[in-house]
Amino acid sequence: ERLRALLESWIAYVEGGVFSGGCFFWAASAEFDGRPGAVRDRIAGLTARWLDELEAEARRAVGQGELRPDTDPAQLAFELHAFAQEANWAHQLLGRDDAFARARRAVATRIGSAQPA
């Protein structure tokens, strides 16, 4: 449940329009990912910490029996991150009003597929 809550909070935050350009880190990453320097390094470091946090939550969920023991926490974190990032992109660039609902469904489906029967 904590993993779901993290993703829901992140999706809701971006969906809420706090930043006019969507997720600040997504926008900054797109601008600076190919440029060396302190800004890129800071964005990369913060993004890596977020992915590590998602992975740690997935690992905790496995340890508590909320997810199957064969779940790969790093892979799950990668996929969940991708769903939320795609929602931001689809909403910002394509104007898709359903982007965040789709991300929520994708998160629920993916986490559900990792839960014990």
Image (tube, helix red, strand yellow):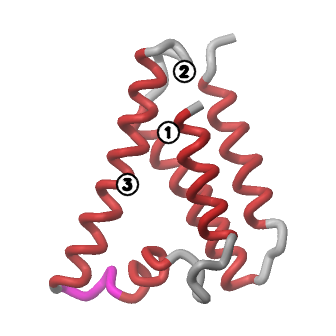
Residue under label 3 = 50
- Where, quadrant-wise, is the N terminus in this rendering? top right
Of pointers 3 and 1, the one earlier in the residue sequence? 3
Reply above or below: 12 against 30.
Answer: above
Distance between mark 2 and mark 1 Cα atoms: 11 Å
Q: Is residue 19 left or right of residue 109?
A: left
Query: How far apart, in angstroms, are the residues tagged by discs 3 and 1?
Result: 13 Å
- Is 33 magenta? The answer is yes
Q: Which residues are magenta?
A: 32-36
Residue ranking furthest to the left: 37
Residue 106: image tag: none
Q: Residue at x 69, y 11 (%)?
A: 117
Query: Dot 2: what SS?
Result: loop
Q: Amino acid at mark 2?
A: Leu
Note whether 92 is above or below 51 in the view shown.
below
The reply, left or right, for residue 27 in relation to residue 104 is: left
State the image coordinates of residue 92 (x, y, percent, origin top left): 67, 82
Which labelled disc corresponds to residue 76? 1
Q: Are marks 2 and 1 in contact (CB under 8 Å)?
A: yes
Cα distance in 3D space between marks 2 and 3: 20 Å
Residue 67: mark:
2
Q: Disc 2 vs disc 1: which is toward the camera?
A: 2
Residue 49: x and y in percent read 30, 54
Q: Secondary structure at mark 1?
A: helix
